[in-house]
Image (cartoon, rainbow, N blue to C red):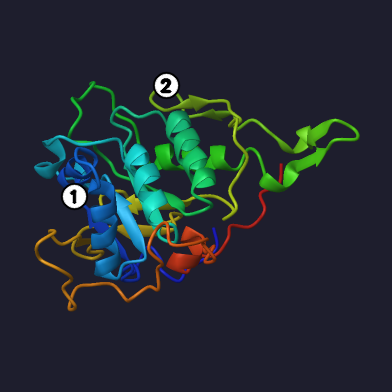
Amino acid sequence: MPSTTAPVTGTPAPTTVAVPDADLAAAVARPGGIAELADRVRASGAAVVALGTDRFDPVRGRGHRLDPTTAALALGRALPTHGLLVAAAPTREHPYNVARRVLSLDHVLDGRVGLVVGAHDHGLPATGAHHDPVEFAEVVRGLWRTWPLDSIIGDRATGRFADADRIRPLDHDGGPDGYRVRGPLTTPSSRQGEPVLAVWHDVVHPAADLVLGGAAHPLVVLLAAAGGPEPSRASRPTATPTAGTGPVTDRRTLRDLLGLPVPGTVSA
């Protein structure tokens, strides 16, 4: 994995703000709530929004919440130039379903999506089974690489949609206590190469793009609606047009916003 400008050993660039689960639930419960939430994100100066990370906290993770990928779809349309990171854990999630949901969302939002993998989802009852979050993350990433975007040919004359030889199964076998995932995904890879893969601070995964949370990698929480922006904690300003005021001309991907390189081509 190539090095990043925000390596897993350092603090990520101050461009990301976390939206509490309670704020997401309140935003979708009232007319205009998503637009108001988007205004708060813009006021924070952040370029990237993290959704669903409350689930990684033993206390905050037990409240009412939404699926972060669903919330990201609504908020991503209201914030057309912001990046979005959605949270998942192997507690009850399967890597194939997560890989497909996140990559599909990344296509809808034009390469502005990433995944944050934590060790535990404290809002879900334990099943008794334990899955390694690092294996979970690597299976998700491996699935993202099973169908290269540039394999799509789209030749109407020959009726050839894609170079099928470049679409390959993952064939992951993690043994009796791990995952068995054949693949490939039914979705081609992303405009940004692949969605950003971040891990929560309780997951040790040197090959991840970045680490979030904890004392060494603090994540700024979005201020309450009545508080207004706090200059000492806000991320650097980002020129962002108001949703609905005109066409989006800033087509930066999440990797662009975070200063991360596009992954190299993975051979079949």
Q: Residue at 37% x, 73% y: name it.
A: 238
Which residue matches tag 2? 176
Report which quarter residue 261 is drawn in.
Answer: bottom right
Residue at the limit of the structure toward the front, as seen here: 245
Which residue matches tag 1? 20
Q: Which mark is residue 60?
A: none
Give the percent coordinates (x, y) of residue 115. Answer: 40, 47
Left or right for 13, reference 19: right
Secondary structure type for disc 1: loop
Secondary structure type for disc 2: loop
Q: Residue at 36% x, 44% y: name it.
A: 74
Q: Is residue 222 above or below residue 62?
A: below
Label 2 environment density (alpha carbons within 10 Å; few <14, some 14–19, many ≥20): few
Q: Residue at 42% x, 42% y: name it.
A: 137
Amino acid on which the number 1 mark rests in the picture:
Pro
Left or right for 19, reference 106: left
